[in-house]
Image: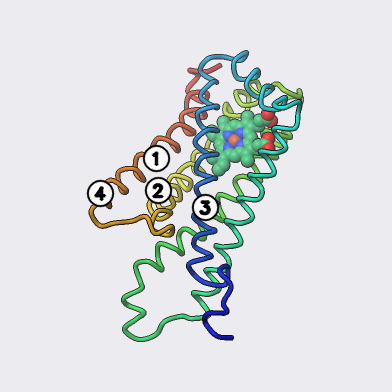
Amino acid sequence: MADSELRLFDTTVGKKAVMAISGVLLLGFVFSHMVGNLLIFKGQEAMDAYALGLRELLGGMGIWVARLGLISAVVAHVWSAIALKKQNSDARPVGYRQIAHQKSTAASRSMFYGGITILLYIVYHIAHLTFGVTAPGEFVDGAVYARVVASFQIEWIAAVYLVAQVCLGMHLYHGAWSFMQSLGLSHPRFNHYRNMFAVGFAMVTSLGFAIVPIAVYAGVVK
Ligand code: HEM
């Protein structure tokens, strides 16, 4: 096949664009989810009302539209990650080129395995807080605040969440840094601001999530 006949998604640029656009949607989701979780500091009523409000959005349709969007973004993100990884290993550079590419390969490798860890965490997290798997006590539908508080009093559950936030923070940092590059929006003059944005976004989001198990475990939220 001639180069001009390549379809966009077959190219590295196309796959990186899919990864970047789905990544930006996921950045938006994690940030708003983190802000929503902070309602735990306002108390049980505020948090449970928020969770219920999400479920009742657009007469119950809203949450499914959001879930569908979220699942599509995750599938697109994982698909492009696997496709890019396969492409890299198929065309493994040799000789001096290997040295030149070492740094970016190490970063993308840690993104790939970090991403798998986050995916496993999300599976556990939904089983845990949406369906009550490993949450102590009886499952009461809609009692989100009570489930979160009872869970994070248990050391190993709080620890799983904290470790996940470390992985998430690193993934968000690299993702927030590289999506602009993938979309052709980078310029050496602005790289300093890009880095500041990536560090700030990753720190605020992962610390915003982490403060919930920490506050519960420390007994600040009961
Ligand atoms: C301390 C950190 C976190 C807390 C306390 C938390 C809390 C919650 C709660 C309470 C729910 C269930 C709401 C309900 O059943 O009504 C939920 C669902 C969910 N969370 Fe988290 N979350 C945390 C971190 C994360 C992270 C880091 C991600 C993604 C990277 C994430 C992704 C999700 C997803 C995808 C759902 C399912 C949404 C749905 O379809 O209902 N969460 N979270």
Above or below for 106 versus 153: below
Q: Which residue is mark 2?
A: 173
What amino acid is labelled 4 in the image?
His
What amino acid is labelled 3 in the image?
Ile
Q: Quadrant of residue 133?
A: top right
Q: Earlier in the sequence, mark 3 or mark 1?
A: 3
Q: Earlier in the sequence, mark 3 or mark 2?
A: 3
Q: Is mark 1 within 8 Å of ligand 1?
A: no
Q: Quadrant of the C terminus?
A: top right
Q: Which residue is mark 3?
A: 21
The answer for how far apart the CA atoms under marks 2 and 1 are is: 7 Å
The answer for how far apart the CA atoms under marks 3 and 2 are is: 16 Å
Q: Earlier in the sequence, mark 2 or mark 1?
A: 2
* Picture coordinates of residue 51, whole percent (x, y): 65, 24
CB within 8 Å, label 4 to label 2: no
The answer for how far apart the CA atoms under marks 4 and 2 are is: 14 Å
